[in-house]
Image (cartoon, rainbow, N blue to C red):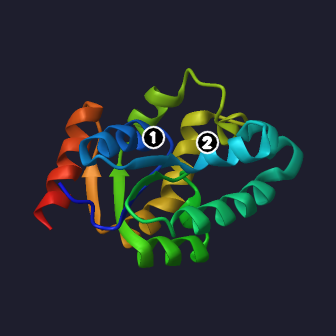
Amino acid sequence: MSTPGSIFLIGPMGAGKSAVGRQLARLLKTDFVDADEEIENRTGVDIPYIFEKEGEQGFRDRESRVVDELSQRQGIVLATGGGVVMREENRRCLAARGLVVYLQTSVEQQWQRTSKGRHRPLLHHGDPKAVLQDLMDKREPLYKDLADLIVDTDGRKVGSVAAEIARHVDGE
């Protein structure tokens, strides 16, 4: 199976971008890169710490630089952060450099998948479910507009989602 350039996974937190991305890269026999992990590796600290010290703006600046660099690599599967679509420069480089796949999920499913974790800085203030809904209201139109392919992940196993994307890639 040949990879068409690179594949960029977008979608909200809890959609499964990292898990699906790892499995998809295995299926396609290519490299997987997680943008958030790359930021943490480069800074030596976790994302909640970056949010605490630099604020969301500082994190988003770092994210834009990393996404610009990583999206220039050929033949990778890249899992992006949920907020990557909020900056036009990010949307532009992703759209121009690979296949963009929106992993769509409901707010209820997001809440179930993220409720036990402590590494989601945007969920540390207020009602997490309300925050997730607000983020979805703002971001979903951008996800849909940017996506070359939309795959629903609600109630699905990682392997099933990755296989669906691989079939799409193989069919191109």
Label 2 crowd bin: few (<14), some (14–19), many (20+), radius 10 Å: some
- The residue closer to the viewer here, 107 or 75, is 75
Percent position of residue 2, x then y? 21, 59
Percent position of residue 110, x then y? 45, 36
The amino acid type of the residue labelled 1 equals Ser
Percent position of residue 99, x then y? 33, 67
Residue visible at 45% across and 29% down?
Answer: 113
Label 2 with label 1: CB-CB less than 8 Å: yes
The amino acid type of the residue labelled 2 equals Glu
Residue visible at 26% across and 30% down?
Answer: 157
- The residue closer to the viewer here, 117 or 162, is 162
Instruction: Say which residue label 2 marks.
Output: 37
Residue visible at 61% across and 70% down?
Answer: 87
Q: Is residue 21 above or below residue 114?
A: below
**Sequence order check: which comes first, mark 2 or mark 1?**
1
Tell me the quarter of the picture where residue 98 sits.
bottom left
Looking at the image, the residue that sits furthest to the top is 116
Work out which quarter of the rendered image holds the C terminus and state it. bottom left
Instruction: Say which residue label 1 marks.
Output: 18
In the figure, is residue 162 to the left or right of 138? left
- The residue closer to the viewer here, 57 or 136, is 57
